[in-house]
Image (cartoon, grey):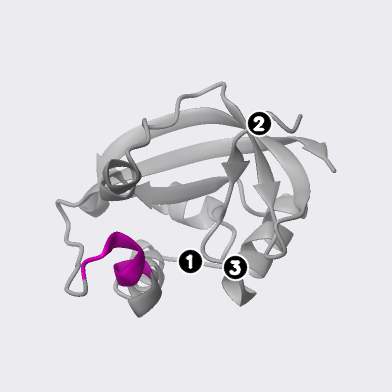
C-alpha cells in the first residue's frame, strides 16, 4: 500500500483537516483541481480506476480512495451535483465557486504556482474527480 500515490487535499492545516474528515464521514465524494496545477507539477491527469492514499495534515495515511470518474471541464460548467458532492456545504454553484476562488487566489496557492497574480475565470480548465473510499486506515 505504501506504493500508492498520495492524495493531498488542500494544504496542511484546518482546510485539509476539514476535507479529510468529510471524506472519512462519506460526505465528500468529489474534488476539483486545475489543469494548470498538473502542468506546473509535470504530473499526468488522473484516470478513473486509479487509487491513492489520503493523508492528513500530519502526513499520516487515513484512507485509500479510488477514482470513479475524471473529467476536464471549464470552471463555468461545474454543476450543482459536483459542488454539493465536494462535502463542504455548498448549496449553490456560486457559493462553490466563491469558496474555491478564495483558495485559488490565496497567497499559498499562488506561491505554490510561483505566480503572485494567478486568477481563474469561466474558461479555466478544471479537473473534476469523483471517488469512493475503498479502505480506511
Secondary structure beneath label 2: loop
Find residue 59 and report its horizontal and vertical position in percent.
70, 57
What segment is highlighted magenta in the picture?
109-115
Residue 19 shown left or right of residue 125 in the figure: right
- Which of the two residues, 136 or 96, is positioned nearer the viewer here? 136
Tag of residue 101 = none
User: For the stretch drawn in magenta, what is the main secondary structure?
Assistant: helix
Find residue 50 and report its horizontal and vertical position in percent.
57, 24
Gap in Å between the C-alphas at discs 2 and 1?
33 Å
Q: Earlier in the sequence, mark 2 or mark 1?
A: 2
Q: Which residue is mark 3?
A: 12
Q: Which residue is mark 1?
A: 91
Find residue 85 and report its horizontal and vertical position in percent.
55, 51
Secondary structure beneath label 3: loop
Task: Inspect the magenta stretch and tell me whether residue 58 lies in it.
Answer: no
- Which of the two residues, 62 or 3, is positioned nearer the viewer here? 3
Q: Which residue is mark 2?
A: 4
Gap in Å between the C-alphas at discs 1 and 3?
25 Å
How would you rate the neighbour count of disc 2 (Cα within 10 Å): few for under 14, some for 14-19, many for 20 or more? few
Q: Earlier in the sequence, mark 1 or mark 3?
A: 3
Q: Residue at x 22, y 53 (%)?
A: 76
Quarter occupied by the N terminus: top right
Q: Does 67 sit above or below residue 99? A: above
Amino acid at each position: 500500500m505504501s506504493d500508492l500515490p498520495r492524495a493531498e487535499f488542500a494544504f496542511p492545516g484546518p482546510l485539509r483537516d476539514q476535507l479529510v474528515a468529510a471524506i472519512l464521514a462519506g460526505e465528500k465524494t468529489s474534488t476539483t483541481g486545475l489543469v494548470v496545477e498538473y502542468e506546473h507539477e509535470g504530473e499526468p491527469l488522473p484516470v478513473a480506476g486509479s487509487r491513492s492514499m489520503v493523508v492528513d495534515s500530519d502526513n499520516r495515511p487515513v484512507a485509500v480512495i479510488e477514482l470513479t470518474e475524471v473529467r476536464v471541464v471549464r470552471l463555468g460548467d461545474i454543476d450543482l451535483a459536483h459542488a454539493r458532492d465536494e462535502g463542504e456545504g455548498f448549496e449553490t454553484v456560486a457559493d462553490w465557486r466563491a469558496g474555491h476562488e478564495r483558495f485559488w487566489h490565496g497567497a499559498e496557492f499562488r506561491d505554490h504556482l510561483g505566480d503572485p497574480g494567478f486568477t481563474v475565470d469561466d474558461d479555466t480548465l478544471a479537473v473534476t474527480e469523483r471517488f469512493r473510499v475503498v479502505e480506511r486506515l
